[in-house]
Image (cartoon, rainbow, N blue to C red):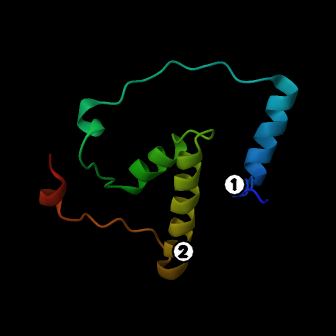
């Protein structure tokens, strides 16, 4: 009888280093929780600049599986965009479709 559980996610070199650090020094101190702004809780929100995209990626929680996968996917897409175009370009899009 085989188990239908998915295989564990592979850790990146950075994640392995973080795990070793935690094994040696223990878990980091908990940080203050921040509330999600009301305008970001529902509906759509947009990233309109490279700086904003970098800020979002830097603030994704490394222990969150979905956030870690989002970061990995976004970085992969950014690398592909950069390889094809030599730069990363964020289209403005149609603001009327995403205004709340």
Residue hosting label 1:
5
Residue 85, image x, y percentages? 47, 79
Circle number at residue 80: 2
The residue depicted at 57 percent of the width and 66 percent of the height is 76
The residue depicted at 58 percent of the width and 41 percent of the height is 64
User: In this image, 82 relative to 4: left or right?
Assistant: left
Q: Which quadrant of the figure has residue 20?
A: top right
* Residue that protrudes farthest toward the front in the picture: 1
Q: Which quadrant of the figure has residue 18?
A: top right
| Secondary-structure class at tag 1 | loop
Q: What quarter of the picture does the N terminus occupy?
A: bottom right
Q: CA separation, marks 1 and 2?
A: 31 Å
* Residue that protrudes farthest toward the right in the picture: 24
Labels 1 and 2: the sequence-earlier one: 1
- Position of residue 76 relative to residue 5, above or below, is below
- Position of residue 53 relative to residue 92, above or below, is above
Q: What quarter of the picture does the C terminus occupy?
A: top left
Residue 55, image x, y percentages? 46, 44
Residue 43, image x, y percentages? 23, 46
Mark 1 vs 2: CB contact within 8 A: no
User: In this image, 91 relative to 78: left or right?
Assistant: left
Question: Crowding near pointer 1: few (<14 within 10 Å), some, many (20+)?
Answer: few
The residue depicted at 53 percent of the width and 44 percent of the height is 58
């Amino acid at each position: 009888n085989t188990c239908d559980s998915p295989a564990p996610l592979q850790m990146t070199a950075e994640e392995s280093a973080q795990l070793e650090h935690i094994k040696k020094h223990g878990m980091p101190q908990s940080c203050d929780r921040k509330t999600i702004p009301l305008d970001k809780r529902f509906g759509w929100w947009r990233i309109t600049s490279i700086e904003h995209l970098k800020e979002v990626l830097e603030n994704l929680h490394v222990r969150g599986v979905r956030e870690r996968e989002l970061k990995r996917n976004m970085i992969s897409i950014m690398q592909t965009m950069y390889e094809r175009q030599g730069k990363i370009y964020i289209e403005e899009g149609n603001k009327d479709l995403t205004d709340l």
